Image: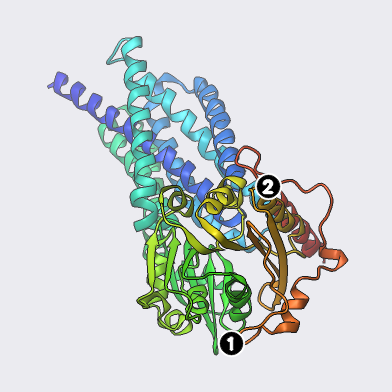
Amino acid sequence: MPSQKKLTEKAALAIAIFIAGLCSIVYELLISTTSSYFLGDSITQFSLTIGFYMAAMGLGSYLSKWCSDRHLAGSFIGVEVLLGLLGGASVPMLYFFFTRLSPNAYQGLVVGLTIAIGALTGFEIPLLARIMKKYYPLRENLANVMSLDYFGALIATLLFPFVLLPFMGLFSSALLFGLINVALGVFILWYFVGHLQQQLKRWLLAASAFVAVAFAALMYQAQPLLNEWDSRAYPHRIVYSEQTPYQQLTVTKNRSDYRLYINRVIQFSSTDEYRYHEALGIVPLESAPYAEKVLILGGGEGLLAREVLKSPRVKEITIVDLDPAVFRLGREQPYVRELNRGALDDERVTTIAQDASRFLSETENYYDLILVDLPDPSNEAVARLYSTWFFGMARERLTANGLLATQATSPFHTRDAFWCIVSTLEASGFSYVLPYHTYVPSFGDWGFVLAGRQAVAITPFRTNLPVRYLDADVVEAMLHFPEDSSRPPGIVANRLDQPALLDYYLADWEKWSREALVQ
């Protein structure tokens, strides 16, 4: 019987090591992803999380040496309960405080949570190693503990992007793994109950029960809480919300105004989106010598395609968007489908759910017109799609007289970022680069860039297409940049190995954020 008990304890500890490694990496991924969603610049957020997490693990490992051998099991169970509490509550806390703290204070909260969870994680592994030493010699013990912990980390990195994020979301995933951590503590408590003092056992059970009940209640109320927190981030009533593997999609309604947000950033308002889409679609379309084959990169909701389909010259449109959920939104969400007039189901339109850069690298087709309707370069994943590498691939897929037009952020609010995109197109091999801009009430002053191998005339502007905004005077005014949005000196191109655009963009918005706080 004693040998059976010993074997059982060994198996229980092996399971504990694996789950501990699993949970700790999941918490790290949850915090860094949540902070990236809210603060942008995922390189900075993941770097800060990894750096502080690893340093805190070292601190926790160092502090563990003062834990008495007589209290190893109890200390480990207490650490698991605390880790479950902090790890499980991390994402709910980040959601709750996002609208209540300044960006700097919010970043401090992210770092604080990372340090606390990292220290507890660093504390638990040495405790497990010391508990395991009575079953294995030192060399075997360290090998078993570290291999099981690292294997748990591997499983976490596979579960997070393929299961947890797409099917559960950040909020519920955090609570689930908090419960798993607490359950691990109770599991070890059950196996090592004979090693614990009666009072400590009661305290640990009570703490575990409290955390478990609290998290179960939060999971039950997850959707109402998320809806309430979302309502603080959006000025109008939410009528559609979906967390996809790539982004958060939200549609709001205010009387006749429908707005689409991606990761809480507005993409269009139904009251004025035609200004943006006519500027990006109709201006280059009417300037292009040929327009039989059109490629749209981004724009999966179908609004830009709606404008392009107005031209009888267009025989074929290919729309490439990373997220298939955006295509579903454009086809199935009644408000969006009404707005795009069923453009995605037009027989001339083909939709492809794929990364735009991968599509350009693999396609053998040539296009008369390429329209780039991608999100703003607020993170490195999107900023690379405004690089010389990306625009160079797009240039190679244009016909001899083909044109490319791209949205290019605001020349007023993100002045350096706008002119960086202009510089990048100039450095990408285009002989002709023409920046222009217009006023879109929902966005403010908004910029675009037209590029080709040879010059084309966009003025005097003439069109027989049904438009609501464009005319000769409007297009003429698009070419004029006043002093406060004109090209500043020293702006460099955005390259893969030197991603200047992201720095320009974040610095521009940081300036406006500071001014808003002062007011």
The amino acid type of the residue labelled 2 equals Ala
How far, Cα to Cα, is label 2 from label 1? 35 Å
- Residue depicted at x 45% and y 41%: 83
Seen at 30% across and 34% down, the residue is 188
Mark 1 element type: loop
Identify residue type, mark 1.
Answer: Asn
Query: Of the residues under marks 2 and 1, which one precedes in the sequence?
Result: 2
Q: Which quarter of the figure is the C terminus placed in?
A: bottom right
Residue 203 % position (x, y):
40, 42
Q: Which residue is rendered at x = 49% and y = 29% of the image?
A: 122
In the orientation shown, which residue stands out farthest toward the right? Answer: 483
Q: Which residue is mark 2?
A: 427
Residue 236 pos. (x, y %): 57, 80
Tell which tag, 2 or 1, sits nearer the viewer: 1
Q: Is residue 173 left or right of residue 120?
A: left
Mark 1 Cα within 10 Å, few/some/many (few <14, many 20+)? few
The vertical placement of 78 against 42, above or below, is above
Residue picked out by circle 1: 464
Which residue is more in the foreground, 456 or 20?
Answer: 456
The secondary element bearing badge 2 is classed as: loop
Closer-to-camera residue (519/465): 465
Whether residue 136 appears in this view of the structure is yes
Give the percent coordinates (x, y) of residue 299.
50, 68
